[in-house]
């Protein structure tokens, strides 16, 4: 089974003065992938609706826990992978189920919880080699501040 490649970019958001984490899948930002999907599916609103996660705005806990689907259960069984373009994840999140095994990490069952009639069954699933996924999280940790410490990955 072919797997996708993941990278987590941590970039400075000039409009907010904070760091934003944006996953890249096979070299393309997840924000761009979801925009293309929603626009092609005729969803409204669509395009430029999503932004990365901003750990300073919400205490996700260690990013390794978050991106392994072990973040606070106050969010329910799914994990926010993206937030709103405004910077708040709760405003317009892209949620997914994250399943972790010894060899694989899978993102599937995507949803936009404020538009429950939207159908994301054709988006993903994304399957990542566990070793490559964990290496990407370690690289993210190397670029973030102690607030999002993932030293135990």
Image (tube, rainbow, N blue to C red):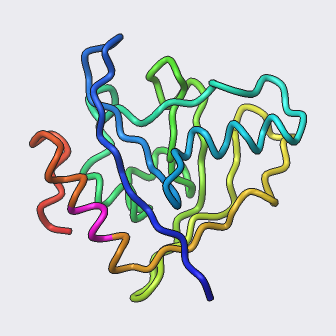
Q: Is residue 34 left or right of residue 46?
A: left
Please name the predominant secondary structure of the magenta segment in the image: helix
Which percent across, then down, holds residue 150?
18, 57
Identified at 31% across, 60% down, the residue is: 65
- In the image, residue 103 lies in the stretch drawn in magenta: no
Which percent across, then down, holds residue 118?
84, 42
Identified at 59% across, 47% down, the residue is: 95
* Residue interval drawn in magenta: 134-138
Count all numbered tags in the image, as a single digit: 0
Identified at 27% across, 26% down, the residue is: 12
- Pick the front one: 47 or 146: 47
Which percent across, then down, holds residue 6?
44, 62
- Pick the front one: 65 or 11: 11
Q: Is residue 103 left or right of residue 147?
A: right
- In the image, residue 136 lies in the stretch drawn in magenta: yes
The quarter of the image holding the N terminus is bottom right
The quarter of the image holding the C terminus is bottom left
Q: Is residue 59 left or right of residue 124?
A: left
Q: Is residue 54 left or right of residue 111?
A: left
Based on the displayed image, in which of its 4 quarters is residue 135 positioned? bottom left
Which percent across, then down, holds residue 44?
84, 25
Q: Is residue 31 positioned above or below 23 on the image?
A: above
């Amino acid at each position: 089974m072919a797997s996708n490649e993941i990278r987590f970019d941590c970039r400075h958001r000039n409009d907010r003065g904070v760091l934003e984490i944006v996953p890249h899948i096979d070299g393309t930002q997840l924000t761009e992938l979801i925009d293309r999907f929603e626009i092609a599916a005729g969803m409204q609103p669509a395009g430029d609706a999503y932004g990365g996660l901003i750990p300073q705005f919400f205490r996700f806990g260690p990013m390794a826990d978050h991106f392994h689907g072990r973040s606070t259960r106050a969010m329910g069984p799914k994990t926010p992978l993206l937030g709103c373009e405004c910077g708040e994840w709760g405003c317009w999140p892209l949620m997914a189920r994250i399943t972790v095994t010894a060899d694989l990490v899978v993102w599937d069952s995507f949803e936009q919880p404020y538009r429950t009639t939207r159908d994301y069954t054709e988006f993903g699933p994304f399957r990542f080699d566990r070793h490559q996924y964990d290496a990407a999280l370690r690289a993210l940790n190397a670029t973030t501040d102690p607030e999002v410490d993932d030293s135990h990955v």
